[in-house]
Amino acid sequence: MNRLLTVAEMTLRELLRRRGVLLLLLLMPLTFYLIRRDAYLGQSVRSLLLGVGWAVSTAALFATTAVRELEPRLRLAGYRPHHLYLGRVLGLWTVGLVISVPSFLLPMIDGADLRYGGLAAALLCSVAVAAPSRWRRRSGC
């Protein structure tokens, strides 16, 4: 468990170095929601979910490219591939939850008449699916 938390922390630190990108990742789902807000409520929620999925998937892409230099060192230090994978996914799920909180609060503040439990479940599903979507296994080392 300690190794998973180490890899998750490493993933979070790599993503926190890109503060401008993180700001864009936070603003993109909110922008998607506001663009479709006038049309139909269901359309704006779908756009919000699409934005959250895109933001988490983009964070996963950045995390994958950032650890290309560190991953061989961690493998030499005794980390197994499942430690690297699960630790990175854990870190990305954390980022996804941070992105999802403002995305969940926006329709509540906007006064939309929604089932908030369903919205929370949909956001969690978007994060759960989008986080491991960019990680691919590399041979070698």
Image: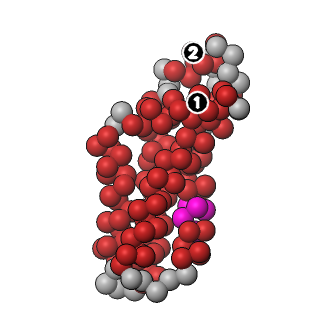
Q: Which residues are magenta?
A: 122-126
Please tell me which residue lies in front, 137 or 41: 41
SS for callout 2: helix
Q: What residue would you read off at disc 2?
A: 73
The reply, left or right, for residue 78 in relation to residue 117 is right
Which three-letter amino acid code belongs to the residue tagged 1?
Val
The image shows residue 26, relative to residue 139, as above or below, that is below
Considering the whole magenta stretch, tell me its main secondary structure. helix
Determine if residue 62 is in view: yes
Give residue 132's position: percent from left, percent from top: 59, 46
Which three-letter amino acid code belongs to the residue tagged 2?
Arg
Q: Residue at x 46, y 67 (%)?
A: 104
Give residue 60's position: percent from left, percent from top: 50, 43
Q: Quadrant of residue 38?
A: bottom left
Give residue 40's position: percent from left, percent from top: 40, 86
Q: Quadrant of residue 124?
A: bottom right
Q: Residue at x 56, y 68 (%)?
A: 120
Please tell me which residue lies in front, 88 or 62: 88
Q: Residues within 10 Å of mark 1 (few under 14, many from 20)?
A: many
Q: Residue at x 43, y 32 (%)?
A: 14
Q: What residue would you read off at disc 1?
A: 7
The reply, left or right, for residue 94 in relation to residue 28 is right
The reply, left or right, for residue 20 in relation to residue 29 is left
Q: Quadrant of the C terminus?
A: top right
Count every numbered label the image shows and give the total: 2
Please tell me which residue lies in front, 45 or 72: 45
The reply, left or right, for residue 31 in relation to residue 101 is left
Q: Residues within 10 Å of mark 2 (few under 14, many from 20)?
A: few
